Image (cartoon, grey):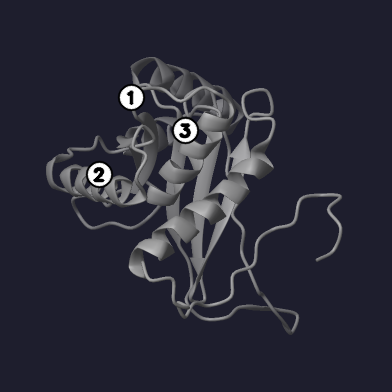
């Protein structure tokens, strides 16, 4: 959340579009039924302010921490099982239509949001495909009329974090710039950990390369 705030602030400044108020992010939360059942995927979305209006990285970190703490303490999410139960009661041929109708209703009732920011926990052991080790796992999500024009999803895998960015090309035509700004936002936070500027041990990070870019 803090990295997204820093990267989006930089992007908004470059485009001369920085608002005085924070952006609003939709954050998906996985829900578990009251009986502890784990069948199916039940997810709800809560809204969290992203402090893009704050210039200092340290203050952005503090505000994000406070917002997430309030969210986990006071939020009362509505279970998303209603959509699953509703669509399961219909013939298969009508399920797609029901999904679209349900999400249209959700869009009318959902609070406004500018983007989705999601964190998906993955396996912390290496995976292999036909003997080849999987080095990275970049998530690919979606954008909709409800979610806003940008989706930033983080996937944790084997001790690393891989970030996938999906955007509406009309709203965010230079999405690769946001990828670079995320890296700069991380460097800002690392500098807070070591103000003297001495080397900070860190695991090497790889970043996806834009199509058509020359090899490093």
Mark 2 is surrounded, within 10 Å at the Cα level, by few (under 14), some (14 to 19) or many (20 or more) other residues, namely some
Using the image as rendered, state which of residue 34 and residue 69 is in the foreground. Answer: 69
For the point 56% across and 47% down, which residue is it? 181
- CA gap, disc 3 and disc 1: 15 Å
Please identify the quarter of the rendering in which residue 23 is found. top left
Mark 1 is surrounded, within 10 Å at the Cα level, by few (under 14), some (14 to 19) or many (20 or more) other residues, namely few
Q: Is residue 1 visible?
A: no
Q: Is residue 2 visible?
A: yes
Q: How many marks?
A: 3
Mark in front: 2 vs 3: 2
- CA gap, disc 2 and disc 1: 13 Å
For the point 56% across and 22% down, which residue is it? 97
Above or below, 176 relative to 169: below
Mark in front: 3 vs 1: 1
Q: Earlier in the sequence, mark 2 or mark 3?
A: 2
Furthest-top residue in view? 108
Q: Which residue is mark 2?
A: 63
Provide residue 7's location: percent of width, then percent of height.
50, 44
Provide residue 60's location: percent of width, then percent of height.
32, 45
Furthest-bottom residue in view? 131
Q: Quadrant of the C terminus?
A: bottom right
Please identify the quarter of the rendering in which residue 78 is found. top left
Above or below, 96 relative to 209: above
- CA gap, disc 2 and disc 3: 18 Å
Secondary structure under badge 3?
strand
Secondary structure under badge 2?
helix
Q: Earlier in the sequence, mark 2 or mark 1?
A: 1
Please identify the quarter of the rendering in which residue 209 is found. bottom right
Q: Which residue is mark 1?
A: 21
Q: Which residue is mark 3?
A: 115
Q: Are marks 2 and 1 in contact (CB under 8 Å)?
A: no
Secondary structure under badge 1?
loop
């Amino acid at each position: 959340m803090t990295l997204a705030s820093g990267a989006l602030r930089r992007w908004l400044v470059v485009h001369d579009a920085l608002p005085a108020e924070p952006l609003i992010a939709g954050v998906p939360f996985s829900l578990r039924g009251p009986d502890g059942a784990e069948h199916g995927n039940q997810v709800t979305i809560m809204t969290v302010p992203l402090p893009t209006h704050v210039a200092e990285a340290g203050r952005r970190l503090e505000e994000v921490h406070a917002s997430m703490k309030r969210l986990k303490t006071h939020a009362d999410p509505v279970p998303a099982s209603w959509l699953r139960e509703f669509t399961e009661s219909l013939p298969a041929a009508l399920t797609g239509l029901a999904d679209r109708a349900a999400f249209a209703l959700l869009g009318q009732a959902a609070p406004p949001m500018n983007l989705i920011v999601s964190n998906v926990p993955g396996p912390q052991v290496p995976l292999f495909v036909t003997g080849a080790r999987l080095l990275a796992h970049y998530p690919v999500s979606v954008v909709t009329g409800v979610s806003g024009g940008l989706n930033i999803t983080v996937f944790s895998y084997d001790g690393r974090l891989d970030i996938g960015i999906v955007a509406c090309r009309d709203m965010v035509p230079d999405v690769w710039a946001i990828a670079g700004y995320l890296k700069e936002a991380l460097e800002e936070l690392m500098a807070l950990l070591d103000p003297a500027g001495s080397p900070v041990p860190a695991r090497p990070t790889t970043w996806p390369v834009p199509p058509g870019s020359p090899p490093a």
